[in-house]
Structure formats: C-alpha cells, structure tokens
Image (cartoon, helix red, strand yellow):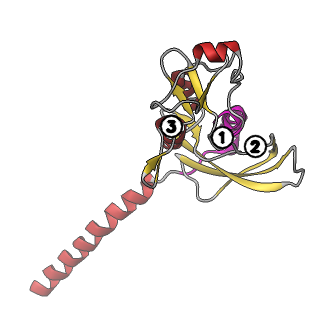
Amino acid sequence: MKKFIGGILSIILIFAMILPMQSCEEVISDPPELSEVRERFIFLIEESKELNLILFGKGLPVYKEDSEISERKMVYFNNNTGNYNIVMENSEFLTVDSMKIAIEKVYSNDYAADIYESAFDGVMTGAASAYVRFYDNGRNLCQNKNATEFKISERIYDYSSMEIVEPSSGDYVNIEIDSYTVDDPTVHRLKLSFVFQNNNWYLDSPSY
C-alpha cells in the first residue's frame, strides 16, 4: 500500500513540474501576420532614413565658422573652444528635446537609449570622455564639427520582398527584405528587427 501511495505522489510531482513548463511555453505568442504590421514597418523604415543622416551621417545644417551669426552666437562646451558649430535657425530641429521626440516615434526604448548615449550624453573612450555630437545650451543647438560622420547613401527597400523570419514572436519580429543603395545598386537581403511596446511597433535595429 505504501508503495502504491508513493507511486501516486511521484506522478503528482511530475505533473506539478510539467504544468508550469507548459504555462511558460504558452506565454510565447505567435508573431503577427505580415499584413497586420506591414504598413507600420514601412512607416518606421522610411522615417528612419532622415534620422540616419542626421545622427550618423552629415548631420544638421550649420552656419559657416566665419559667418557673422557664427561669430555672434558661438558658444563653447566644457571650456573647449572651436569644437561646435551653431545649427542654422531654419533647421528641422533646433533643440535636443525635439530630436528626441522624433527618435522616440521611430525607435524602441533600448535602441533610442543607445543613440542618446553617443549623440547627446557622451561616451567614455578609455580615460577620456568623447564629445557628444549635439549640444543644447538652452539658446542654440550646436553640432560637434569633429564628430565622426559616416558616408550614408540613400537606401532603397523593396517592400514587396518583405517577409517575417525566425526568431519572431508576438512582441518581437524579425524581417528580411531586399535592399540596395543609390551608390551601390547591388541588391542585398537585409534583416531588421521590431519590438512591440507602448501598444505599438518600433524599430529595434539599424536601417542604414
């Protein structure tokens, strides 16, 4: 009788271990259909193109260093003169906050945080702190003229080739899509990632 009861208890323990595992598996939901997210993904990719140029490429338009307004408005960062130029008053962005608003409309929280570190907060390189690319002193938006600028050619995407690939789930989707640049017409198959947060999808990877 004791052996019988022991056997029953063993079975109960096995089921108790299996059921939580099944519950965890059920939490992972299937990825959405491409038709459900396609327009949103296209919007995010297209919006990212200009941000790529501003954040990693040529940046924003600035006044020439020898111009009258540059001499009149020139400000200094960390008492280090000559590192920044004044962003022109007709620029699309005139403050760091306005740039962050645009970034947060496109990118995920994690990817936006990485952008902020290099563009606005500064990053440590060994024992020295690298200058941020954009500096807002409350009066003018300034752009670091010594910041590394990548040559970013306009990228063209063939949205008809877009498909969802693994690994993907209900809150994180990877896609593959054919793409080429204006400078290089060779078609490459690119992989982009999107994350679902704040009740919407956001780009979670570079698109340049």
**Numbered range of the magenta stretch:** 30-57
- The numbered dot on residue 116 is 3
How many C-alpha atoms fall within 10 Å of the one at disc 3: few (<14), some, or many (≥20)?
many
Magenta: predominant secondary structure element? helix
| Residue 121 at least partly seen | yes
Which sits earlier in the primary sequence, circle 2 or circle 1? 1
Name which residue type carries label 1. Answer: Phe
How many C-alpha atoms fall within 10 Å of the one at disc 1: few (<14), some, or many (≥20)?
many
User: SS class of the residue under badge 1?
Assistant: loop
Q: Where's the C terminus, which quadrant?
A: top right
User: SS class of the residue under badge 2?
Assistant: loop
- Residue 19 x/y as whole percent: 33, 63
- The reply to whether discs 2 and 3 touch (Cβ–Cβ < 8 Å) is no
Residue 35, magenta (yes or no)? yes
At x 61%, y 45%, the residue is: 32
Tell me if 14 is positioned left or right of 125 in this view: left
- Name the residue beneath numbered marker 2: 152
- Name the residue beneath numbered marker 1: 56
Mark 2 and mark 3: Cα distance apart in space? 19 Å
Q: Where's the N terminus, which quadrant?
A: bottom left
- Residue 68 x/y as whole percent: 69, 13
| Residue 42 at least partly seen | no
Residue reaching furthest right?
185
Residue 42, magenta (yes or no)? yes
**Residue closest to the eye, 30 or 168:** 168
- Residue 143 x/y as whole percent: 60, 29
- The reply to whether discs 3 and 1 touch (Cβ–Cβ < 8 Å) is no
User: SS class of the residue under badge 3?
Assistant: helix
Q: Check the image and report above or below for 33 versus 20.
A: above
- The reply to whether discs 2 and 1 touch (Cβ–Cβ < 8 Å) is yes
**Residue closest to the eye, 81 or 20:** 81
